[in-house]
Image (cartoon, rainbow, N blue to C red):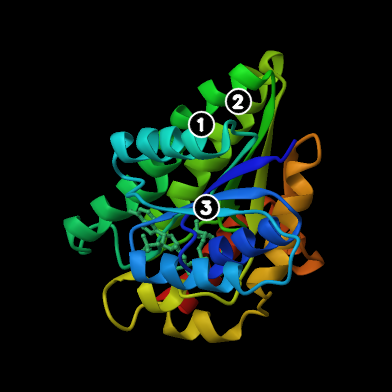
Amino acid sequence: MTHVVLITGASSGIGYATALTFVRQGWNVIASARRVEKLAQLEQTVNALPSPHGELLAIAADVQKADDMQNAVQQGVARFGRLDALVANAGIGQRGSIVDSKWEDIETLLRTNIDGMLHSVRAAVPEMRKLGGGHIVIISSIVYNMVSPYAATYAASKAFVSSSAAALRFELESDHIGVTDLLVGRTESEFNERRLGQAGYGEKASGRLPRMSAEQVANAIVRACNGKGGRFTLRLFDRLVVLGNMLFPGLIGRIAMRQYK
Ligand SMILES: NC(=O)c1ccc[n+]([C@@H]2O[C@H](COP(=O)([O-])OP(=O)(O)OC[C@H]3O[C@@H](n4cnc5c(N)ncnc54)[C@H](OP(=O)(O)O)[C@@H]3O)[C@@H](O)[C@H]2O)c1
């Protein structure tokens, strides 16, 4: 029996690398995102892999829309017959002050990072319940507990998803659905270039942090789907950031203010 995973935001960065890693390991993958041309590129890459490997079904879907996520799950289950795992990965950044940022940018961030995670989870869980179990990986960030002036909406959106993951772990325990909350640090992807917000904010911070490859994060996601769940960071540096945020919020807030403004 071949396992099946739904990945949101599979058209670039971490989601793209995760789709390839699952397929290489023999899973069938439902790869969703809005940019169909990028999904077509992913399909071509999968088709060129040496056999054996899993299959990939690309589906155009906007995580901001509940119907799109329901449809992605239905199409995936119609094709592969089951759903074992969800990687709620789609997300976007935003920089600028809470007061002066464009409302459209703030709204897009909230609808994508918060509604997107909720719509994905709510669409996927009923199919996992039918199987008697499954796994959800929620992609959060090491800034989830950071005082983040000029990047507050993004950090708060990741606080929301991490808090939801912690609650879901209890809510879905009796369904045998594990929940992983992955606190990701700076990673090579399209994230910075696609970030919303006021020009100039955060340029200093972007270049300095040590970066992981998207493949490193992808490997951790696949491992997580075979585990029991919990909250994880991937590097010592990331653990130190999370600890620093916890112990010295005022100091970190001052540093972040200088970096992000
Ligand atoms: N890169 C980092 O340093 C870093 C650090 C911590 C956490 N993260 C998190 O990692 C996740 C993946 O980001 P990434 O770094 O891989 O960035 P990325 O390369 O920009 O990928 C973001 C993905 O999200 C998708 N997406 C955005 N809005 C969407 C929407 N409305 N509907 C469906 N899909 C949507 C994009 O696809 P389409 O535009 O084609 O729809 C794209 O596939 C995000 O949740 C991000 O917050 C990243």
* Quarter holding residue 37: bottom left
Task: Identify the residue under disc 2.
Answer: 128
Alpha carbon separation for disc pair 3 and 2: 18 Å
Residue under the point 41% across and 70% down: 38
Task: Identify the residue under disc 1.
Answer: 124
Label 2 SS: helix
Q: Is mark 3 within 8 Å of ligand 1?
A: yes
Label 1 SS: helix
Q: Are marks 1 and 2 in contact (CB under 8 Å)?
A: yes
How busy is the neighbourhood of tag 2: few (under 14 within 10 Å), some, or many (20 plus)? many
Alpha carbon separation for disc pair 1 and 3: 14 Å
Task: Identify the residue under disc 3.
Answer: 89
Callout 3 amino acid:
Asn
Callout 1 amino acid:
Ala
Where residue 28 sits: x, y (%)?
63, 48
Count of labels in the image: 3
Q: Are marks 3 and 2 in contact (CB under 8 Å)?
A: no
**Which disc is residue 40 wearing?**
none
Earlier-in-chain disc, 3 versus 2:
3
**Which one is nearer the viewer's eye here, 140 or 205?**
140
Label 3 SS: loop
Earlier-in-chain disc, 1 versus 3:
3
Q: Is mark 1 within 8 Å of ligand 1?
A: no
**Which one is nearer the viewer's eye here, 243 or 27?**
27
Alpha carbon separation for disc pair 1 and 2: 7 Å
In this view, the residue farthest toward the top is 174
Residue under the point 33% across and 48% down: 110
Where residue 204 sits: x, y (%)?
48, 85
Above or below, 238 relative to 171: below
Callout 2 amino acid:
Met
Q: Is the C terminus in the top left, top right, bottom left or bottom right quadrant? A: bottom left
Q: Between tags 3 and 2, which lies in front?
A: 2
